[in-house]
Amino acid sequence: MIKVIIGGICGHMGKTVLELVRTDPETECIAGVDLKQEDCGVLLYQSFAKVQEKADVVIDFSSAANLENLLAYAKRTGAAVVLAATGYTPEQIQTIRHSADEIAIFRTANLSVGINLLQKLVREAAAFLGESFDIEIIERHHNLKKDAPSGTAYMLAQSANQAFGGEKRYCYGREGMVGARERAEIGIHAVRGGTIVGEHEVMFAGDDEIITLAHSARSKRVFAAGAVTAAKFICGKPAGQYDMQDVLANK
């Protein structure tokens, strides 16, 4: 059994991860970490600095503010880490990179297995289609999302841009007399409304034909499921930084 500690266990995503871990025959949750003190049915700590149990993997959906204590725990115990929190500063990202010299760390812009497969397909399609097709990305999210475009839209744009040596520039929406579309553009457009969990569409528009690659998340459960998949993948791996593309390559 893979022993798991869940950071942010009392939050919505933490509770969903706990539910999935409990129903997975390969994993068990031995403790949780959260500032809240709710009864989750497992041993609960308010800080990683206080955790005594030794886990194989930590899945962290808490906060970027907990990064220092989380990494200290992992280095002390040898646990692998799945970073599922958001809002890391450039300095923290650098800390994560340095820490990967000592421990196994899994971090990705989107934990959905489907989105990461889409990323791979977009990269391959852009390389095959080349300059003969225009690339436009449309992302849709709920009306409470604060940032635009989404980090996943950027991830998809970067995947497509790899086929062009990173030379394409990103065009964020269009308004007014902007003139004819330039070949050097990748269009990125954000839609906000209702309770849309997350939809991403990459359109390759050529002469007389359109190819569309798309993904739709119907609930946030897909991200929790991706985190558990990541935990099972990274358990026992040597020090280094991993992402969902490594999981897909392994499959």
Image (cartoon, grey):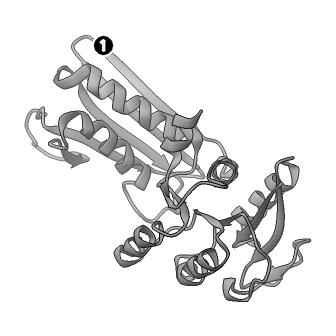
State the residue at coordinates (54%, 78%).
Answer: 67
For the residue pair 62 and 186, the one nearer the viewer reads as 62
Q: Please name the residue that numbered disc 1 is placed on.
A: 209
Is residue 138 positioned above or below 41 on the image?
above
Q: Is residue 32 left or right of residue 129?
A: right
Q: Is residue 177 left or right of residue 186?
A: left
What amino acid type is highlighted by mark number 1? Glu
State the residue at coordinates (36%, 78%).
Answer: 91
For the residue pair 77 and 225, the one nearer the viewer reads as 77
Q: Quadrant of the C terminus?
A: top right
Is residue 172 visible in this depiction of the protein?
yes
Residue 203: x %, y % from top left: 35, 29
State the residue at coordinates (47%, 66%).
Answer: 100
The image quadrant that residue 12 belongs to is bottom right
For the residue pair 244 and 148, the one nearer the viewer reads as 244
Is residue 79 positioned above or below 66 on the image?
above
Is residue 60 visible in this depiction of the protein?
no
The image quadrant that residue 186 belongs to is top left
State the residue at coordinates (27%, 32%).
Answer: 135
For the residue pair 175 and 48, the one nearer the viewer reads as 48
Q: Is residue 201 left or right of residue 205?
A: right
Number of numbered discs visible in the structure rendering:
1
The image quadrant that residue 211 belongs to is top left
**Dot 1 lies on which element?**
strand
Residue 20: x %, y % from top left: 80, 52
Is residue 110 positioned above or below 85 on the image?
above
Q: Quadrant of the N terminus?
A: bottom right
Residue 207: x %, y % from top left: 21, 13
Classify 10 Å Cα crowding around label 1: few (below 14), some (14-19), many (20 and above): few
Residue 239: x %, y % from top left: 52, 61
Q: Residue furthest top?
A: 208
